[in-house]
Image (cartoon, grey):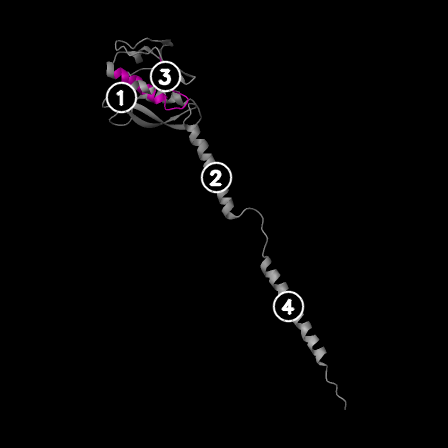
């Protein structure tokens, strides 16, 4: 009986083929495991950042609109009354498109907060209000200009000036009686022939 022993070279070649096949299968498995699902669109972090930026931009636009003399909706404003011989602030919400006029109407209605007073004569009426080149031209009826003493008259005028000049578009106030400029107020002699700004009332400033 003649037995043939396989040659060592053929035996080594077989093992080499098996090793190469195993390496190829291993590489294929790693590629599939690392690929994972493919998604499109921004990541949650970047999407959240975009939303926050948009909200901040919207908030800035809203606050800017709320302090302009005209605009729709309800506006938070400051009304100036008097307390202990000085001007004092009362926050208020006024509706409507003409914020400046609504502020004046609320001012003439008087304070709601205890301890505040108004030096504007009861029954005073605003006949017209127009803003031109930073000056609010306000026409009142004669009742508004009735005698009230030196300090009372100064507080009365200061209430109107401070309440209107809180708006960026208004720098000063020209007081008119039934559409006409007065030289002075009643017997107090407070000059009204030119627009008045907050600087005119430094002695009674809040």
Q: Is residue 70 left or right of residue 204?
A: right
Q: Earlier in the sequence, mark 2 or mark 1?
A: 2
Instruction: Give the spatial CA distance, label 4 vs label 2.
Output: 51 Å
Q: Is residue 38 above or below residue 195?
A: below
Please state the extent of the stretch shown in magenta in the rendering: 152-175
Residue 23 circle label:
4
Q: Disc 3 to disc 2, how far (Cα)?
A: 39 Å
Give how far across and how far down residue 185 sits, in percent. Answer: 29, 10
Q: Residue at x 46, y 31 (%)?
A: 61
Quadrant where the image shows the C terminus? top left
Q: Are the residues at dot 4 and dot 3 in contact (C-beta closer than 8 Å)?
A: no
Which residue is labeled 3 in the image? 173
Q: Earlier in the sequence, mark 1 or mark 3?
A: 3
Please identify, in this view, whether the residue under mark 4 or under mark 3 is nearer the observer: 4
- Give the mark nearest the N terminus, 4 or 2: 4
Dot 3 or dot 2, earlier in sequence: 2
Say which quarter of the image contains residue 169: top left
Crowd class of label 3 (few under 14; some 14 to 19; many from 20; radius 10 Å): many
Judging by the rendered image, the residue that carries numbered circle 1 is: 204
User: Which quarter of the rendered picture does the N terminus lie within?
Assistant: bottom right
Nearest the eye: 161 or 148: 161
Query: Residue beneath label 2, please?
Result: 53
Q: Are discs 3 and 2 less than 8 Å apart at CB?
A: no
Q: Secondary structure at mark 2?
A: helix
Q: Alpha-carbon distance for marks 4 and 3?
A: 90 Å
Q: Secondary structure at mark 4?
A: helix
Query: Vertically, is 50 above or below 166?
Result: below
Q: Residue furthest front?
A: 9
Q: Residue at x 27, y 15 (%)?
A: 153
- Residue 199 in magenta? no
Q: Do the residues under discs 4 and 2 have CB atoms within 8 angstroms?
A: no
């Amino acid at each position: 009986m003649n037995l043939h022993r396989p040659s060592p070279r053929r035996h080594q070649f077989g093992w080499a083929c098996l090793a190469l096949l195993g390496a190829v299968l291993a590489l294929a498995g790693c590629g599939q495991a690392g690929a994972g699902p493919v998604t499109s669109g921004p990541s949650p972090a970047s999407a959240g950042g975009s939303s926050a930026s948009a909200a901040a931009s919207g908030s800035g636009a809203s606050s800017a609109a709320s302090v302009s003399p005209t605009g729709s909706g309800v506006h938070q404003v400051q009304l100036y009354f008097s307390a202990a011989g000085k001007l004092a602030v009362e926050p208020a919400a006024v509706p409507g498109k003409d914020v400046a006029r609504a502020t004046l109407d609320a001012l003439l209605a008087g304070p709601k907060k205890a301890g505040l007073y108004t030096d504007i004569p009861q029954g005073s009426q605003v006949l017209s209000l127009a803003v031109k080149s930073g000056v609010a031209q306000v026409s009142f009826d004669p009742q508004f200009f009735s005698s009230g003493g030196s300090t009372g008259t100064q507080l009365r005028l200061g209430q109107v000036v401070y309440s209107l000049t809180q708006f960026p578009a208004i720098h000063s106030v020209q007081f008119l009686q039934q559409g006409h400029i007065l030289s002075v107020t009643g017997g107090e002699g407070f000059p009204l022939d030119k627009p008045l700004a907050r600087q005119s009332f430094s002695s009674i400033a809040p």
